[in-house]
Image (cartoon, rainbow, N blue to C red):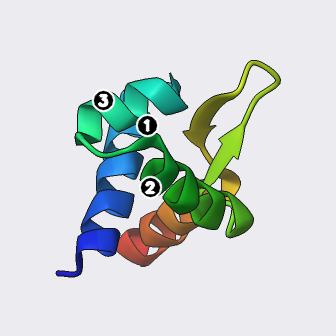
């Protein structure tokens, strides 16, 4: 797995536990804030994460839509 993909997935896993700010995510991933911010901007552009007015990141609507699709596939 590529390093960027792994880090992006780690961000999603961390956000699954609740919202985090940039400093918290950088600390948990053990990488510089600029690296995490670059990944977050990509995830945000694709709606996998969203940022609130307090600059905390949350899981986004695209991830919820994918989960919904999986639920429908399991029901069929």
Residue with the mark numbered 3: 27
Q: Report how many numbered discs are placed on residues in the image.
A: 3
Which of disc 3 and disc 2 is earlier in sequence?
A: 3
Q: Indicate which disc, 2 or 1, sits on the residue closer to the N terminus.
A: 1
Q: What secondary structure is found at the residue carrying circle 1?
A: helix
| 27 sits left or right of 8 in the view | left
Label 2, secondary structure: give it. Answer: helix
Q: Is residue 11 above or below residue 16?
A: below
At x 71%, y 37%, the residue is 51
Question: Of the numbered discs in the image, which one, if any, rests on residue 49?
Answer: none
Compare residues 27 and 45 and report the one nearer the observer.
Answer: 27
Question: Is the residue under label 1 in contact with that under label 2 (CB below 8 Å)?
Answer: no
Marks 2/3: CA distance? 12 Å
Quadrant for the C terminus, please. bottom left
Q: How far from the left and from the top, in percent, is residue 52? A: 76, 29
Task: Classify 64 as above or below 30.
Answer: below
According to the picture, the residue beneath numbered tag 1 turns out to be 15
Query: Which of the two residues, 61 or 24, is positioned nearer the viewer here?
Result: 24
Q: Picture quarter containing residue 75?
A: bottom left
Task: Give the Cα distance between marks 2 and 1.
Answer: 17 Å
Residue 22, horizontal then vertical, whole percent: 52, 32
């Amino acid at each position: 797995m590529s390093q960027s993909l792994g880090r992006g997935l780690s961000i999603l896993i961390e956000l699954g536990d609740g919202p985090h700010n940039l400093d918290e995510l950088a600390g948990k991933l053990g990488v510089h804030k600029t690296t995490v911010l670059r990944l977050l901007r990509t995830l945000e552009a694709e709606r996998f994460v969203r940022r609130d007015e307090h600059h905390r990141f949350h899981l986004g609507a695209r991830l919820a839509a994918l989960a919904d699709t999986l639920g429908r596939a399991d029901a069929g």
